[in-house]
Image (tube, helix red, strand yellow):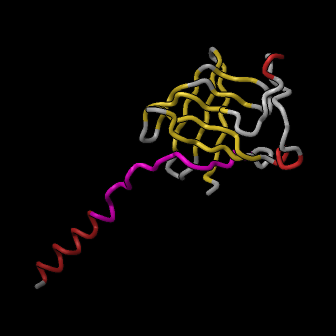
Amino acid sequence: MKLLLAVTASAAMLVAAAPAPPADITGLWATGSNDGRVQIYRCGAALCGRVVDAAPLRADPDRRDIRNADPKLRERRLKGLVVLQGFTGGPTDWKGGPVYDPETGSGASKGYLKLRPDGKLEIKGCVAFFCRTKVWTRAG
């Protein structure tokens, strides 16, 4: 009987110690800036992300991409704007691009996504050797 209890306890400890299955990063993420929300979704075999909400959009739902470096793109609506494109990899690291930041109007041709152990998502965009990282938290 003691042996059976020991084996059962050992098996339970192994199950508890097993790593959790990889998290799916699709869903709604809070950007931490302007109360922004980005929806990460599957786009073919890759992952993409689009703006779904932000404080400025609640004040003006028709807000445009006025900070874009390309004058031809400044009339695009921010709501629904794709800001992450073509990310592949996983289960914790993805790479792709481009990445676009509508707050600054700048983008990066290369991007990296990293799901941290604490459940937060690092978004890194690089132009040449210059990189900028933001940390998002799950919003829903």
Q: Is 109 a magenta residue?
A: no
Residue 28 in the image: state x and y as whole percent: 62, 50
Q: Nearer the viewer, residue 36 or 77?
A: 77
Q: Main secondary structure of the magenta part?
A: loop
Residue 117 appears left or right of 102: left
Question: What is the residue that sits farthest to the right in this orientation?
Answer: 59
Residue shown at the point (63%, 50%) measured from the top left: 137
- Please determine whether, in this image, residue 133 is positioned above or below residue 72: below
Report the span colored magenta: 15-32
- Please determine whether, in this image, residue 30 is positioned above or below residue 92: below
Question: What is the residue that sits farthest to the top in this orientation?
Answer: 128
Residue shown at the point (88%, 44%) measured from the top left: 60
Residue 52, image quadrant? top right
Task: Give the position of the C terminus as an image quadrant.
Answer: bottom right
Residue shown at the point (65%, 38%) measured from the top left: 50
Q: Nearer the viewer, residue 23 or 134?
A: 23
Residue 27 in the image: state x and y as whole percent: 57, 49
Question: What is the residue that sits farthest to the bottom in this orientation?
Answer: 1
Residue shown at the point (82%, 44%) measured from the top left: 57
Q: Is 21 a magenta residue?
A: yes
Task: Give the position of the N terminus as an image quadrant.
Answer: bottom left
- Please determine whether, in this image, residue 87 is positioned above or below residue 40: above
Q: Nearer the viewer, residue 9 or 136?
A: 136
In the rendered picture of this protein, how many numbered marks are placed on residues?
0
- Please determine whether, in this image, residue 58 is positioned above or below residue 66: below
Residue 12 appears left or right of 43: left
Residue 107 in the image: state x and y as whole percent: 70, 23
Residue 55 appears left or right of 44: right
Residue 72 in the image: state x and y as whole percent: 80, 16
